[in-house]
Amino acid sequence: MGNSAKNKIKALIAHTLFLTCAGSLVMFRTSSGRYFERLKNSIFITAYTECHGEEDLAALQNKIETVAGVKKVVTVTEKEIFAALKGALTRKDILSAIQNVRIPVMYKIYPRTLDYKKFGKIAADINAFNKIKYSDTGGKAVKKLFLFASDFKTAVAFITVLLLLSALTAAAAAAASMKYLSEKFRFLSERNISRKDMLLNHAAETVIIPLSALIVSILIMLAVYQARRGDIIFFLTPPQVLLLAVFSAFPCAVRLTKRD
Amino acid sequence: MKLLIKAENIWLENSRSVVFKNVRTEIKKGDFVWIEGAGASGKSLLMRTLAKKIKPSKGKLLSYTKTPLCAPDGSLLENESVKNNIREMLRRRKENDTAFIMTELMKSMDLFDVRNIAAGKLSDSQRQLLNLSTFLVLETEALLFDDPLAALDNEHRILFIAAAEKKRNRGTAIVISSTLPCPAACPAGARHILLKDGKLSEE
């Protein structure tokens, strides 16, 4: 095998590695971000009130929203609770038995941060309101969720750094694999070969290698996604694929501008 | 003869001094021009100016063709063989017998025996011969060589001048700058120009 073919294979492998690392990083960040969002949405304080008038409920909701650390408040009215029970209960006759019982209105209060101490303080502040009859933080189960969220955040940061380092190393390797190209471009430009001629004669290096590497890396990521997707891993979106396409041109662009 | 380069009173100044002044010369198709000058007399800067790599400070430089300039520090494809370095330039030629042209050139430049060796492993003299060869295969109307003989021994200098003469006979103007006087191996009718104290004088 000639030097030229060897150089092209090396460049293709380095580009594929770089794009796979970069794509994995994008996929991991998106998937972990969405998972974390889901986790956050499953943590809330439940507060009950015996107020039933719309104005009273709205005023109380506004008051809760002013508590420091509260991100969002969702009101679940008596009717909505009945509707939910109707759907959930197997013995519907229970509902007719409690028809005369007034069910308290429920507020779902989502915290802004996943800090357990702040979460407890929010719950205490809300509990102190006169019109709140009772509030529930979820007890030990929710506390474990907080611990999990904290560990999850650390793990995500650690894996992100590792993937980022891998992507940067692979990018440097991809740029280095194209060193022969900048050497060739310098050689040709010194001999007055036009830039257009150079680019046309080296389309394989400047276009086909990055494009092939992009396709191969997407196929690798697709294979991993198909094998392990569940509902946790999210595949690349079209703008993210476009971003990878831009990334794929970087090593070559670096070489075209840097002629050493 | 077709006019390829015309310098009309060109000057080149740097921050400290005038490198050359009032340079007037014409290079026509088929010319063999030898520019002689002592070290640091401004030969390289003059060659770079004629090759349009530097803009003259004053005067007008008309160039009617591409003027590749072979500099002593010219790059090579270090990991490629001698053959592939020359082949890279031959790829752009229209002739079909490029293999024959390459063999002839390698033989005439004493590179045939090292044809399969990577450029990075050649001696300084062989590297320079290869550098010169990659310019000699160019299909162009003018070729400029800046100090091409410095790294060569006498035998190889004669080989290069003979190869350049051959190229000139096919109609390419050859301009060579050197610290050495025009050697006897130079073809009859070669123009000898002296660059001294920033002035160019033709003998």
Image (tube, rainbow, N blue to C red):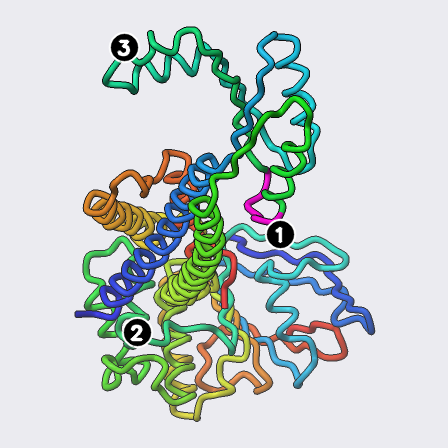
Q: Quadrant of the N terminus of chain A?
A: bottom left
Three-letter code for the amino acid on which mark 3 is drawn: Asp
Residue B30, visible in the rendered structure: no
Q: How far apart are marks 1 and 3 (CA)?
A: 102 Å
Question: Local crowd at mark 1 within 10 Å, few (<14), some, or many (≥20)?
Answer: some
Q: Give the range drawn in magenta.
A: A112-117
Q: Distance between the residues labelled 2 and 3?
A: 88 Å
Q: Residue at x 43, y 49 (%)?
A: A247
The answer to whether residue B124 is above or below residue A92 is below
In this rendering, the label closer to the viewer, 1 or 2: 2
- Asked if badge 2 and badge 3 are on a common chain, one would say no
Question: Local crowd at mark 2 within 10 Å, few (<14), some, or many (≥20)?
Answer: many
Q: In this view, does A113 lie to the left or right of A125?
A: left
Q: Label 1: which residue?
A: B62
Q: Label 3: which residue?
A: A93
The answer to whether residue A42 is above or below residue B50 is above
- Asked if badge 1 and badge 3 are on a common chain, one would say no
Three-letter code for the amino acid on which mark 1 is drawn: Leu
Q: Which numbered marker is on residue B80? A: 2
Q: Is residue A88 left or right of residue B24?
A: left
Q: Which chain carries label 2?
A: B
**Of callouts 1 and 2, which one flags the residue occurring earlier in the amino acid sequence?**
1
Q: Which chain carries label 1?
A: B
Magenta span includes B61: no
Q: Residue at x 29, y 51 (%)?
A: A213
